[in-house]
Amino acid sequence: MSKAIYTNEHKNLIEKLKSARLSAKLDQKTAAHRLNKSQSYISKMESGQRKVDLVQLKQIAQVYGKNIDYFIK
């Protein structure tokens, strides 16, 4: 397995993060507010500059109205 952050699996996750946010009809600023994060945090997460841990992913899934399986399958 590659140690690079930009694996296909990681690219798939960041695409799903943005897609889920948009389907929840949230802009980055609103999503950030609901997650108690900054807008730049969301931007960096969606551009792949920031890794997402499982606890964060669980919170994101709740805010975006998705099951966590959506992001990891």
Image (cartoon, rainbow, N blue to C red):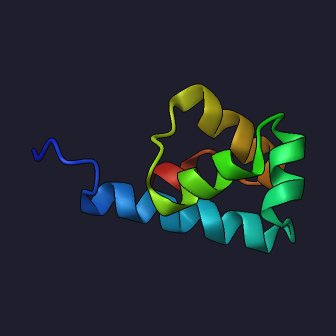
Which residue sits at x=89%, y=43%?
34
Marks counted in the figure total 0
Q: Nearer the viewer, residue 37 or 9?
A: 37
Q: Is residue 67 visible?
A: no
Residue under the point 63% across and 66% down: 18
The residue drawn where x is 89% and y is 55% is 30
Q: Nearer the viewer, residue 1 or 48?
A: 48
The residue most toward the left is: 1
Quick check: 42 above or below 51? below
Residue 3 figure quarter:
top left
Q: Is residue 13 visible?
A: yes
User: Residue 1, located in which quarter of the rendered image?
Assistant: top left
Instruction: Give the percent coordinates (x, y) of residue 53.
Output: 51, 31
Image coordinates of residue 8 in percent, x first then y, are 27, 63
Quadrant of the image containing the C terminus: bottom left
Where residue 28 sits: x, y (%)?
A: 78, 61
Find residue 26 and report its horizontal and vertical position in percent. Answer: 86, 65
Q: Is residue 52 left or right of residue 26?
A: left
Relative to 24, residue 72 above or below:
above
Which residue occupies the extreme top position in the image?
A: 55
Please state if 3 lies on the left or on the right of 46 as rendered.
Answer: left
